[in-house]
Image (spheres, grey):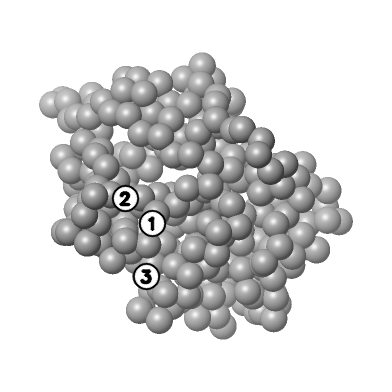
Amino acid sequence: MKALPDGPLALPEGASKPPVIEFRGVGLTYPGPPPVEALRPGNLRVESGEFVTIVGPSGSGKSTFLNIAGLLDAPTSGTYMLDGIDTGALGDAGRTALRGRRIGFVFQSFHLLSHRSAQENVALAMLYNAVPRRERLPRAREVLQRVGLGHRVDALPPRLSGGERQRVAIARALVGNPSLLLCDEPTGNLDTANAQTVLRLLDELHQDGMTVLVITHDPQVALRGGRTVSIRDGALSERAEHPEAIT
Ligand code: ADP
């Protein structure tokens, strides 16, 4: 697979980069009443090029974590640095712009437009960034090739398998050359075979230098990361020592 030009994958070798994610005492308490401490103040560093999984049961704080890491919600305590940028210093517009440039989201439901081809679905993600109109379709094709769907660019989503649909969604997330691929239960809607295809693709992207963060309740999916962080009752903790023991 070929790295796209101008993105984080194209940085010169040996260039030192700040962590992609750095949480310093980041927490979130929903005001209530009663207040709910959904994410307890904690630290987390995800270096550029890491593949990290966050695993925890329902209600443990995964969505709260995702919303903060994805700049959809601001924490109520601590400092969140994304690519060395203090996100707390940004207003809403600045956060939205940073999110658009740096984060590619992949969700459990693929959120594809069913009457648009795979290529158009990916190209539509470039509507709000600086890619000139005439470059959008060729670029969408290039990224679809990168995720192994070069032969399906004209297919409508209903004609694609679940795994292929998720790969279109991953292509859409990648097309803006994000620093971080943030995946929320990316295999949650897939059967085992399709889930394996998607997990292999995430492995390949990671091997190409992409920073991948996967949030899941599935311990088997969590094992695919180079490092696993567990979340329990809103508390983040490293679980690398005995990853096979995750339950
Ligand atoms: P998960 O994604 O792991 O299921 P969540 O992050 O959705 O967990 O929820 C963590 C905790 O925060 C739960 O106790 C949940 O009930 C609570 N919670 C989530 N959203 C809100 C909200 N908007 N207001 C109050 N409490 C919330």
Reading the image, the residue beneath label 3 is: 189
Disc on res. 90: none
Q: Marks 3 and 2: which is nearer the front?
A: 2
Give the total of numbered labels: 3
Image quadrant containing the N terminus: bottom right
Residue type at numbered disc 3: Asn
- Taking 88 as reference, is 65 left or right? left
What residue did someone put label 1 on? 225
Image quarter for residue 99? top right
Name the kind of residue labelled 1 in the image: Gly
Tell which circle, 3 or 2, labels the residue nearer the N-terminal end. Answer: 3
Position in image of residue 189 (x %, y %): 37, 70
Residue 81 screen position, x and y as percent = 48, 26
Q: Position of residue 90 (x, y in %)?
A: 54, 20
- The Cα–Cα distance between marks 1 and 3, rounded to whole angstroms, is 19 Å
Kindly identify the residue that appears in the image at 56 percent across and 83 percent down: 159
Q: Quadrant of the C terminus?
A: bottom left
* Residue, disc 2: 228
Residue 224 location (% of width, % of height): 37, 62
Amino acid carrying mark 2 in the image: Thr
Q: How dense is the environment of label 1, judged by Cα within 10 Å: few (below 14), some, or many (20 and up)?
A: many
Q: Work out whether residue 108 can be spotted.
A: no
